[in-house]
Image (tube, rainbow, N blue to C red):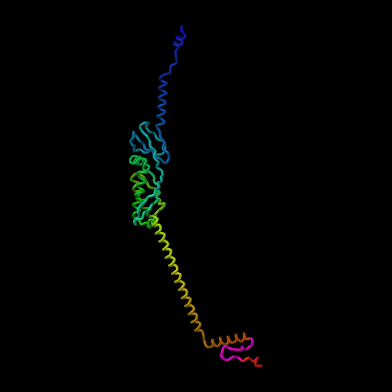
Amino acid sequence: MDSSKVVNMIPKPKMSKSLITSGLVLLVLIFLGLNAFVIVNAGQRGIVLQLGAVSPIVLTEGIHFKIPFIQDVIHVDVRVQKSQSDQTAASKDLQIVTTTVAVNFHLEPSAANKLYQSVGLSYGDRIVDPAIGEAVKAVTAQYTAEELISKRSEVSSKIKETLSSKLSTYYMILDEINITEFKFSEEFNNAIEQKQIAEQRALKANLDLQRIEIEAKQKIEQAKAEAESLRLQKQEVTPELVKLREIEAQIKAIEKWDGKLPNVTGGAVPFINVNGAQ
């Protein structure tokens, strides 16, 4: 018998179709199992899309079940975000002012699906930045350039109120707003500098005037005191006191005399030099 026929007559091991089917089913189940759960990280919310439609359910932090191939989850950050920009506007007195504004805001967690449905994830460029510019321009126009500086806290409060109203329409919450800088034109800065110089000079002149007035009053009071002293002294002078002062003066003159007479006097008749005559 031909050897090749003998080999063909030996039964070959056949792989069971049921085993292959079971393996495929297991792989499908593993794949479905891995795609049936989603994890929402801290500071995020999960927006559920069911066949492309936004579901009213918003997933919170943690692990959640979803229907594979039917549901998809979009992760949205609901933590505090920052937007800073320079806004140029005209003040009430028509001065050009560039305001640097830093805004802190966050999405309303329970309404993240509504924001996604109406705006999408580009809410910063579409909503936040234009709203900041509009709020700054609206409030800046209510104040003069000098008032923007002197009433900085009031201006900031009004911008915050206006911006908060605009952002709440799109399910965003304004946390804080900070005006970091006001920039004015060079001409206005020069005018402010000249005004400050003039105020400083006026203040110095006023202080000098007050000093002169005080010194004058001091001199008047000193003169009054001296006059009062002379008046009191005059009241105390009596003939006896005058006579006593004359005697005291003569005694002091005698004590100082060395016993020699002067050769001449200041009058018309000179003293005679006794020694020369002898």
Toward the top, the furthest residue is 1
> Can you say whether 111 is above or below 255 in the image?
above
Q: What is the x, y in percent for residue 203?
A: 43, 65
Q: What is the x, y in percent for residue 31?
A: 41, 29
Residue at x 61%, y 89% (from the top left corner)? 263
- The overriding secondary structure of the stretch rendered in magenta is loop
- Of 168 and 147, the residue lying toward us: 147
Residue at x 60%, y 89% (from the top left corner)? 264
> In the rendered structure, which segment of residues is drawn in magenta?
258-271
Toward the bottom, the furthest residue is 278
- Of 230 and 122, the residue lying toward us: 122
Q: Quadrant of residue 194?
A: bottom left
Toward the front, the furthest residue is 276
Residue 254 forms part of the magenta stretch: no
Residue 264 forms part of the magenta stretch: yes
> Can you say whether 43 is above or below 272 in the image?
above
The reply, left or right, for residue 252 in relation to residue 86 is right
Where does the C terminus fall, quadrant-wise?
bottom right
Q: Quadrant of residue 207?
A: bottom left
Q: What is the x, y in percent for residue 123?
A: 36, 43
- Of 39 and 224, the residue lying toward us: 224
The reply, left or right, for residue 260 in relation to residue 172 is right
Q: What is the x, y in percent for residue 30?
A: 42, 28
Residue at x 42%, y 38% (from the top left corner)? 41
